[in-house]
Amino acid sequence: MPTTLFGKCVDVYFEFNYEHLLFKLADQEQKLERDELTSLRKRVELICRQVSANRGNHEPTKNKKGRFVSLYKWEFDFAKEGLAQMMDVADRIVDEVYQEIRKWSKHVSKGDYKEQAK
């Protein structure tokens, strides 16, 4: 999903990597500064913890900077969980996280991200 964060165009998206659903940032030109990325990570963690309150294994990822950055991950167990159940959970996570990120991105696009990140 293309979005504007801190006045800069970036993409946020989800991908499955083995048994993990990852929420990622594509910052191809590495436009975001370290403090902006840190602020984004804090906000993403708050959003994802709230969305995942009833879901077991989930956590923020390591604090790295780059063109493609994982921000948060959820662990699934393909051996124990049915595909339909996993997809229902993943769909709910994606919908709720995107909705909250869209709301937050409107604030950070206006420059008031410092207040929003707290």
Image (tube, grey):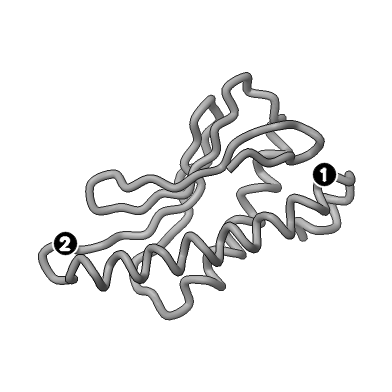
Three-letter amino acid code at disc 1? Answer: Ser
Q: Residue furthest bottom?
A: 54
**Residue name at image x 83 percent, y 51 percent:** 114
Nearer-N-terminus badge (1/2): 2
| Residue 39 location (% of width, % of height) | 70, 47
Can you identify the residue that label 2 sits on?
A: 78
**Image quarter for residue 11?**
top right
Instruction: Judge by depth and name the residue closer to the eye, 14 or 84.
Output: 84
**Image quarter for residue 33?**
top right
**Residue name at image x 52 percent, y 35 percent:** 64
**Tag 2 secondary structure:** loop
> Given contact means CB atoms under 8 Å apart, are the residues at marks 1 and 2 in contact?
no
Can you identify the residue that label 1 sits on?
A: 109
- Alpha-carbon distance for marks 1 and 2? 38 Å
Q: Classify residue 95 as left or right of residue 55.
A: right
Three-letter amino acid code at disc 2? Answer: Phe
| Residue 73 location (% of width, % of height) | 41, 54
Vertical comparison of 57 with 21: above or below: below
Q: Residue furthest left?
A: 79
| Residue 72 location (% of width, % of height) | 47, 52
**Residue 91 numbered mark, or none:** none
Q: Classify residue 35 as left or right of residue 95.
A: right
**Tag 1 secondary structure:** helix
**Residue name at image x 73 percent, y 60 percent:** 103
Vertical comparison of 28 with 62: above or below: above
Q: Classify residue 85 as left or right of residue 50.
A: left
Q: Classify residue 4 as left or right of residue 54.
A: right
Pointer 2 local density, CA inside 10 Å: few below 14, some 14–19, many at least 20: few
Pointer 1 local density, CA inside 10 Å: few below 14, some 14–19, many at least 20: some
